[in-house]
Amino acid sequence: MNLKKLLFTASLLLPLAANAQSITPAQIEQFKSLPKAQQEALASQYGIDLDSLQSSGQQNQRPRAVQVVEPVPNTPEEEREKARDEKQEEQKIAAKNGGLKPFGYDLFRGSPTTFAPVTEIPIPSEYTLGPGDVLRIQLWGKENKSLELPISRDGTISFPQSGPMSVAGMSFDEARQQIRKQVSEQYIGVQASVSLGELRSMRVFVLGEARNPGSYSVSSLSTITNALYVSGGIKQTGSLRNLQLKRNGKLVGTLDLYDLLLRGDSSHDNRLQPGDVIFIPPVGKRAGIEGEVYRPALYELRNENTLADLVRMAGGLTPQAYPQRINIERTSEDFLRIIAEADYTVAEGKNARIQAGDRANIPSISDITGQYIEISGAATRAGRFAWMPGMRVSSVIKNLDADLTPVADKRYAAIVRTDEKTDTISVLNLRLRKAIQNPGSAFDLPLEEKDQLLIFSDAGKVEGGEEGREFTRESLFEPVLRRLKSQATPSSPQKTIRITGPVRYPGEYPLPASGQLSDAIFVAGGLRDSASLFNAEVARYTTDKNGIGKTDILNVSLADAMAGNGNLALQSRDRILIKSIPEFAKTSTIELKGEVRYPGEYTFRDGETLKEVIERAGGLTDNAFPKGAVFTRAKLRELEAQRLREAEERLQGDLLSVQLEGDSFGGQNAQRVDEVKGLLEDVQSSRPVGRMVIDLPQVLADTGYQPIRLQDGDTLTVPTIPQAVSVFGEVQFPTSHLYTAGLTVDDYLERSGGPTRQADESRVYVVKADGSVMLPEKSRWFGSRSQQLAPGDTVIVPIDVDRLNQLELWTNVSQIVYQMALGAAAVGNL
């Protein structure tokens, strides 16, 4: 320490050497910051008792804060297990009472580890002082000083310049008066203000049906409810209405927590004293209340024994309650559950006796029963609206754009009307656009009480999302049709019809009130452009004179019916068939490719032939090779695809059987498996062509050759004059060779290296350029197979299926694959 600081400290101690009791806490703290050797030297130099100085400083120091709540901690596993057990018990109680939970137990639920001391409230004058309390004394006047004097274990405080003063056991008001008197006697011109600082802690017991029973340290100002918070609350098996406060073995007070919970009354929440016991007895009689009350729950009964008391505890009835018929379920004297009723609107019902185990159910008032109309479907503001006499459709739908959603059908709507006398419904058709555009007209139908206005969606406006799909005619009319069918009687047949054919929304609909066919078509969205106006059919179910049902077919001129000139009135269960124009908007096309004067996609008339279309296309070019023309048809392509699928399935089965045979000596079976797999891959990679063999030169020459009647999807590909002969299949080098006049089949086979070991020489065949097949004469290799080939021909050398366990399917499969490959190659070479 430097000299300056040391001299400053000494100057502080000089005037205090006479009486160490007058040293302020700040001076003591500054002195204590010095090294111990310097403290002893200064104390010895100025004659100060170091021990008394330190004890004086301790007397004026604020006592160390104590933990005011010290519950015994449980391990996390014990807490979780206890919480599970409590939850299961609560679920059992709720299950026994129809899901109702006891009222009030959640208020004190919890397991706090600390509890804030009660120091912010005014100290009552009757508060009894004890060891651990701290008195704050403010002196002012001739001498200003602040003192904090803790009450020691012997119940005294050490007041400056006087001996110990006993204050334990005094009330705070008595101690305050005594301190003021002593200050006024010992200090002339000095007044004192006394307040209570830190409070002592005390130990109390929470026993009985507490969630965590035991001993707890709480603030000396704590009350019964403070201790309940500390202990975690009350179990559902404990009473909330008869909490007992015991002191020295005697009952000194009771607390009804319902006063606090329901009325906010804490007047009986007595302050605790050391050693007090809070005893929570088992729960008393309970009754439940549910339904239209603000706090449905189980309530503990004490002095309440009427229905009005139970309703009052539950917060009263809600505005939706129906008080004239309250059901009370209770146990009879024969231990049977019975139901009693009470009218809460009269005094007798309010005074109905409530017994232990009763459960009252407050029913709800019924839904809106009158003075309304309802809008359903694709409306901007769907729901119920007030009805007034004289109201029309234009009164609730004023603007088609603002009051309807974008997907709404603005042409048609329906009104479902209920007859109050018979409770049956009927359906009125509404031309919505005309009704809104002409308010007050005949189209603007008057609305009656409880009418339901159905606004449908327009399928043409509904995009990929779900918006509007739930408002289709089918979905909105479904409950209406079900109701119409259920109310049908022999005297009032089922008022439904069904319409099919080219209308926008075919289906089942309510029978129009007008009975006109035009109105039925309007309900179905109107006619499509493919509808035939010449004739329509109405299938009508009737009974003959013997009462046997039969069906009559009525032909109707649709044009007259739509013009309003028809005299046919629709009846129950009529089925209307709107006929389509035959071949309406049907176009059939053929595609001409290759060496055609004007290639392209041509539309042909019904019955038109290939020759006629080629003539329309300007005929063939000079480079055309009509013998090699490839004519394909869509239906044949589908047939080939089916054959390919069948061949693939059978090959997969054969492959499995070959694999199950196991390998033989020399590995021959493994070789067969590889060959079958290769053939299967060829089948899977093949694509159907749908080629039909035709002789195009004969077709064009018109020499009695069968004319080719065209079908939609046909394709004609005319190649250029070829210069090659191809050799495919089991040859050493499958390829195409330049055509040379005079060369035979054997010559071209020799140019491809000859057949392989798997080749079947006896089945060699030639596919001509037009797709036809020629079988050369059977002979030995390089024998008399001397047929000369033409440009565009293809020689096929098939596989020897006899080597592969006589699988007959393989021959057909190989031919299918080669034929498709040739067709694809002919098209691809263009």
Image: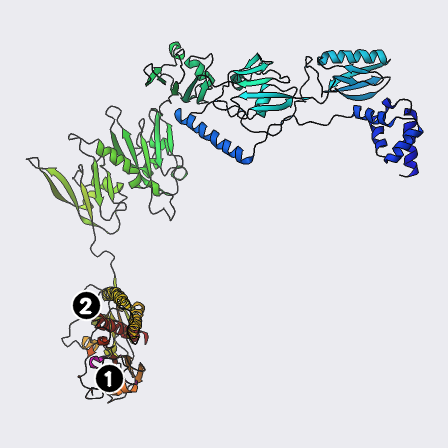
Residue 362, image x, y percentages? 39, 20
Disc 1 element: loop
Residue 688, image x, y percentages? 27, 68
In this view of the protein, can residue 765 be seen by the observer? yes
Tell me which label, 1 or 2, sits earlier in the chain. 2
Membership of 345 in magenta stretch: no
Boundaries of the magenta span: 752-769
Q: Is residue 733 left or right of residue 120?
A: left
Q: Is residue 146 above or below residue 662?
A: above
Residue 320, image x, y percentages? 41, 22
Q: Quadrant of residue 199?
A: top right
> What residue do we see at 23% from left, 56% from top?
584
* Numbered tag placed on residue 105 in the rendering: none
> What residue do we see at 20% from left, 81% from top?
762
Neighbour tally class for label 1: few under 14, some 14-19, many 20 plus, Cα within 10 Å: some
User: In the rendered image, which residue does mark 2 sit on?
Assistant: 709
- Amino acid at circle 1: Ala
Q: Is residue 587 above or below residue 8?
A: below
Quadrant of the image for the N terminus?
top right
Residue contact between numbered discs 1 and 2, judged by CB atoms under 8 Å: no
Membership of 756 in magenta stretch: yes
User: In the rendered image, which residue does mark 1 sit on?
Assistant: 790
Q: Quadrant of residue 442?
A: top left
Q: CA distance from mark 1 to mark 2?
A: 29 Å
Q: Quadrant of residue 179?
A: top right
Disc 2 element: loop
In this view of the protein, can residue 692 be seen by the observer? no
